[in-house]
Amino acid sequence: MIKKLPHPSTTLITAGRESRLNHGIVNPPVYHASTILHPTVESLEKKTLPYSYGRRGTPTTTALQEAIAEIEGGYRTLLAPSGLSAVTTALLAHLDHGDHLLMVDSVYGPTRSFCEGILRRFGIEVDYYDPLIGADISQLFKSNTKVVFTESPGSLTFEVQDIPAIAKAAHARNIIVMLDNTWATPLFFRAFDHGVDICIEAATKYFCGHSDVMMGSITCTPATYEKTLAGHGTLGMSVAPDDVYLLLRGMRTMGVRLKQHMETGLRLANWLKAQPEVARVLHPALESDPGYALWKRDFTGASGLFSILLKPCAHEAMSAMLDHLEYFGMGYSWGGFESLIVPQYPKSVRSATKWQEEGYLLRIHAGLEDVSDLIADLDAGLARLRAYG
Ligand SMILES: *Cc1c(COP(=O)(O)O)cnc(C)c1O
């Protein structure tokens, strides 16, 4: 009988734990280390110990790396001190002077800033492409194209990309496909089953889940691992053991948390869609969304992050709505237990496509509060917006 592969929600609980090696204690110990002592010259010079130096890892970091690799269904995982550093490390590890990078136009803003501010300076060509391009990405390939970077759905505006079509075109030309999978997590999008070569997560968001740790992960296929490892090591990427511990702790409940984020997010999205002040809801799991068909084909769930487009209104009216919300905090990042709302301005972070909407775009993170309280809060906010006139 072939053993059934566990559901990813089960792997979330079992992965990266070796209680037998740790007195039966459920969670791994926190090793604080820089120096690791070697007993002999031979051991020192031939690196015979499993660990050689704190920066390069300890049993604590191994526990999290193995856990994420298993949950992603990838080969191996490397950790970085933030989601952004995971993105920049993966790109720097694989791009050389003179290479060409294709970057999705709806990418996370700071990823774009890295391309503009650092990669261009180092002589790497960057072209942005329409997130809806699909197989036509091949028309943008040049002889020096090395990496296609994807993020699906897109930051702020939630366009769903046809990752399998992009991966097929890229692989025909030996081009590496990277994905920022932060929105869906491996629970709702199986990157490696859809042709991705390197899957990046801002673990700061849902993996952590408690708004208190910065972390990023880079998970590779066997073919992309060695080069990524070399770049990661050379760049000096290292994460703190207490953060790793908190990350592992938060991650265990990601399955139940995400189900709730999804349900509450959809309830809010549907309620908001019916409000007269709302022009459009940008949420790929709504049937009315242009990305719905691809989302339905490729994803197994939706997280709690989406946007709404308000009908054009005064800045003061939008502020009146947001300034006095009781449960929705205003602040960056997302994926924690609490609800958030922030105005966002995609116009300034697009170049291959245009964002021409006039109204304010509000990005919402549906937290774990009861949905009835969240709806009442938004209802009162929209009443303040209306009252402004
Ligand atoms: C937040 C975010 C990042 C960056 O993560 P940090 O841990 O904040 O550096 C990268 N990609 C996406 C899609 C994000 O939302």
Image (tube, rainbow, N blue to C red):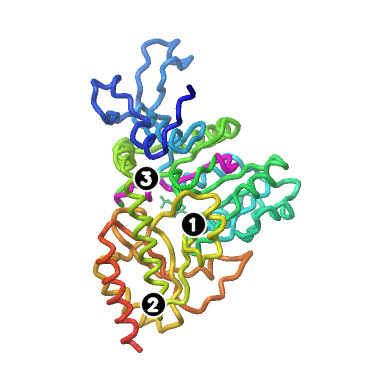
> For mark 1, does the 10 Å Cα neighbourhood hold few (<14), some (14 to 19), or many (20 or more) residues?
some
Q: Is residue 117 left or right of residue 7?
A: right
Q: Which residue is mark 2?
A: 275
Q: Which region shows up in magenta?
A: 193-210
Is the residue 166 above or below the residue 19 in the image? Answer: below
Instruction: Kindly indicate whether the residue at mark 2 contacts the one at mark 1 (C-beta within 8 angstroms).
Output: no
Is the residue 382 above or below the residue 200 in the image? Answer: below
Q: Is residue 343 left or right of residue 338?
A: right
Asked if the stretch drawn in magenta spans residue 350, the answer is no
Q: Which residue is mark 1?
A: 110
Direction bottom: furthest residue: 389
Query: Label 3 is placed on what type of residue?
Result: Phe
Instruction: Kindly indicate whether the residue at mark 1 contacts the one at mark 3 (C-beta within 8 angstroms).
Output: no
Cα separation between marks 3 and 2: 32 Å
At 40% across and 75% down in the image, what residue appears? Answer: 274
Query: Label 1 is placed on what type of residue?
Result: Pro
Cα separation between marks 3 and 1: 20 Å
